[in-house]
Image (tube, helix red, strand yellow):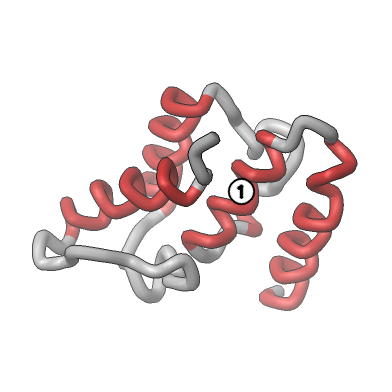
């Protein structure tokens, strides 16, 4: 099974490169807005592309899109949605929600 990072990172990087063609890589802890310069429409495009590639939409019910701040947050959301047992992702979901609450 392919790691979710192997799907998410290239999609995010492709969109980042449209804004900064000199960018050749990114890190899981890069902030989408602060470090990568993405806007809400860019995030919407990332989610749409990832939904096409994975068949998953973790933001429909599992995770609030406003809680996503980093590339890692996107990966975690898709890992949660892909978990075969909904309870398996509960801890990760709670961690994402806790990070979002801390940022408020």
Give the quadrant of residue 67: bottom right
> Residue at the location (58% across, 58% down)?
73
> Residue at the location (36% across, 74% down)?
35
Identity of the residue furthest to the right in this view = 87
Mark 1 nearby-residue class (10 Å; few <14, some 14–19, many ≥20):
some
In the picture, the quarter occupied by the N terminus is: top right
Q: Relative to residue 87, is residue 68 depicted above or below? A: below
**Residue 44: x and y, percent?**
44, 40
**Residue 87: x and y, percent?**
89, 41
Which of 68 and 9 lies nearest the eye of the viewer?
A: 9
Identity of the residue furthest to the left in this view = 22
Q: Relative to residue 18, is residue 69 depicted above or below? A: below
> Residue at the location (47% across, 60% down)?
71
**Residue 63: x and y, percent?**
71, 46
Counting the numbered discs, the total is 1
From the viewer's perspective, tell me whether residue 36 is left or right of residue 92.
left
**Residue 103: x and y, percent?**
67, 76
Which residue position is annotated with label 1?
65
> Residue at the location (60% across, 42% down)?
78
Circle 1 sits in a helix, a strand or a loop, which is it?
helix
In the picture, the quarter occupied by the C terminus is: bottom right
């Amino acid at each position: 099974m392919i790691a979710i990072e192997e799907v998410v990172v290239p999609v995010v990087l492709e969109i980042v490169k449209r804004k900064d063609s000199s960018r050749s890589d990114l890190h899981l802890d890069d902030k989408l807005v602060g470090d990568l310069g993405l806007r809400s429409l860019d995030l919407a495009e990332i989610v749409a592309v990832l939904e096409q590639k994975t068949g998953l939409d973790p933001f429909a019910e599992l995770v609030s899109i406003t809680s996503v701040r980093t590339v890692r947050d996107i990966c975690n959301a898709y890992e949660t949605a892909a978990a075969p047992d909904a309870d398996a992702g509960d801890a990760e979901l709670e961690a994402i929600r806790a990070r979002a609450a801390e940022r408020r």
